[in-house]
Image: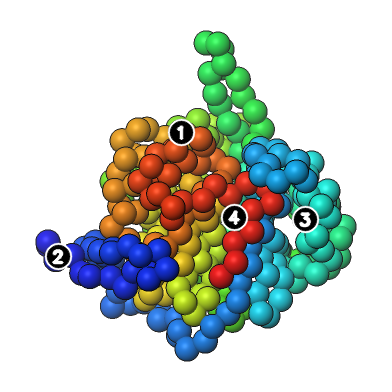
Amino acid sequence: MKLPALKGGASKKWNFLLYYAPCPVLMEELAGHLPVKGDHSMKTKITILCENTVGRVIGSGEHGFSAFVETDHDNSLFDTGNGHAIVSNSLALNKDLRTARRVFLSHGHSDHTGGLPEALKLTGKVDVHAHPSIFLDRIAVRKVEGEEVRRFAGLVYKKTYLEFLGANFVLNQEFSEVQKGLFLTGEVPRRTSFEKNDPSLFVEIDGKLVQDTLMDDQSLVLDTGKGLVLLLGCAHSGVINIVHHVVNKTGKQKFKAILGGTHLDFLTPEQLEESIKALKQMEIEKIGVSHCTGMKAASRLHQEFGNRFVYGCVGTVFDF
Ligand SMILES: [Fe+2]
Ligand SMILES: [Fe+2]
């Protein structure tokens, strides 16, 4: 089915004329979506706490991702970095982890969950929202100078230890509203033909390595009332699959911003180009990538999105 491109409501602020062309899969599913009511406005501020690079004179970089999310209602922590920088960076950036009312884990990889114990020591008893598969044993296998090198890449702490520190795990697989205007995507259907699993990532099951499909990968969605803000961890589900899923579930197509890790650095040039092509057909005001996007993919995105592009490093603040 070929659908005509529809004129979208591009932001006057960015002065761009955008066109949104709904994909056939998306249109099929729209009949079953649960519309998110847009009769409110919610101030939202997102501060990058942990990231591979540092953009201000304060804070430390590490391979990982974490963001502090403040809304009119309360504060949340999204991911926790790899464990070395979350506390010192939150202090340097004046974000009090003791005020986080909940923690979201985008997936089980250690560069997103490694700081959980340190965060819990400050939050005390708190809900930790995640997919049940975050506890799987993850192994990354890469070739270094021709040699196969295996690295444990999963959550390195026992569930009971994390519960002892105050974690109350709230496990979800479905799209869910956690707080007014604050949604978790749950599992994301893999629909696009060009978004593939990272072939270097595995899970160990009964002593055997099996390709990791990262079904636990989920993202945070904030409905600001002026457009959606989509906050990605690593986007292992594929950034375009995630955007389609969010549009299907919310019934909204206008994105104030897409932020976080896109994993585009680890994939093929074809996937990067197809993803950029698809992103350009959507109504997105700002793209603020981080972490596993990598410099090569970030440069391509900058080239394509111009002043709508921002690199989100430690200390970057997004205010909506
Ligand atoms: Fe990551
Ligand atoms: Fe990851």
**Label 1 is placed on what type of residue?**
Lys
Spatial CA span between label 3 and label 2: 47 Å
Spatial CA span between label 4 and label 3: 22 Å
Tell me the residue that label 3 is attached to.
Answer: 93
Q: Residues within 10 Å of mark 4 (few under 14, many from 20)?
A: many
Q: Nearer the viewer, residue 311 or 23?
A: 311
**Label 4 is placed on what type of residue?**
Ser
Nearer to us: label 3 or label 2? 3
Nearer to us: label 1 or label 4? 1
Relative horizontal placement of residue 51, taking residue 265 as reference (left or right): right
Label 3 CB sits under 8 Å from any ligand 1 atom? no
**Label 2 is placed on what type of residue?**
Leu
Where does residue 311 sit, x and y in percent of width and height?
54, 47
Q: Secondary structure at mark 4?
A: loop
Spatial CA span between label 1 and label 3: 28 Å
Q: Is residue 228 above or below residue 136?
A: below
The quadrant holding residue 124 is: bottom right
Q: Secondary structure at mark 2?
A: loop
Nearer to us: label 4 or label 3? 3
Where does residue 28 sit, x and y in percent of width and height?
24, 69
